[in-house]
Image (cartoon, rainbow, N blue to C red):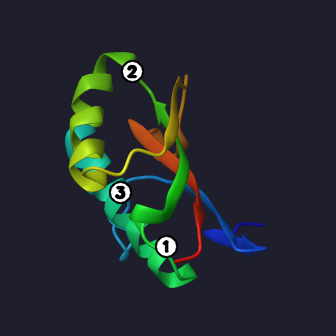
């Protein structure tokens, strides 16, 4: 009942990613380490679907604790450089597997 991404009419709808490495192990305990792995995962999902982070149109960030916003924003900015997709950040009471960060996105095909 889950796809990492679905492509429809030139648009990629990528499911939320958390800080699991490809081998299923957990990557990092703090929000910065988790955000780095989440965006690494998102990049891989987009690449597999035929796109890149530079083609992200909109991202949604879910944070377990809004006190992590500045830290996650710094990591996020390092992945997107000058590209600035539309974005929202939502506080979430609980995320899968106790994650501190989850990110989903919508992207155009490259």
Q: In the image shown, does 50 or 71 lie closer to the viewer?
A: 50
Question: If you read the primary sequence from the N terminus, does the residue marked by circle 3 or circle 2 appear first?
Answer: 3
- Residue 70 at x, y = what percent? 25, 24
Q: CA distance from mark 2 to mark 1?
A: 25 Å
Q: Which residue is mark 3?
A: 39
- Residue 34 at x, y = what percent? 29, 47
Q: Secondary structure at mark 2?
A: loop
- Residue 51 at x, y = what percent? 50, 76
- Residue 46 at x, y = what percent? 49, 72
Visible residue check, residue 29: no
Q: In the image shown, does 62 or 53 lie closer to the viewer?
A: 53
Bin the neighbour count of mark 3 within 10 Å (Cα to Cα): few under 14, some 14-19, many 20 and up: many
The image's mark for residue 65 is 2
Q: Which residue is mark 1?
A: 45
Residue at the outermost front position: 82
Q: Secondary structure at mark 3?
A: helix
């Amino acid at each position: 009942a889950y796809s990492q991404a679905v492509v429809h009419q030139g648009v990629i709808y990528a499911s939320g990613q958390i800080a699991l490495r490809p081998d299923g192990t957990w990557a990092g305990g703090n929000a910065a380490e988790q955000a780095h792995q989440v965006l690494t995962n998102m990049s891989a999902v987009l690449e597999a679907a035929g796109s890149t982070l530079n083609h992200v149109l909109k991202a949604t960030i879910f944070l377990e604790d809004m006190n992590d916003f500045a830290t996650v924003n710094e990591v996020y900015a390092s992945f997107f450089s000058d590209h600035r997709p539309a974005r929202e950040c939502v506080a979430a009471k609980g995320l899968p597997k106790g994650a501190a960060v989850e990110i989903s996105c919508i992207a155009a095909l490259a």
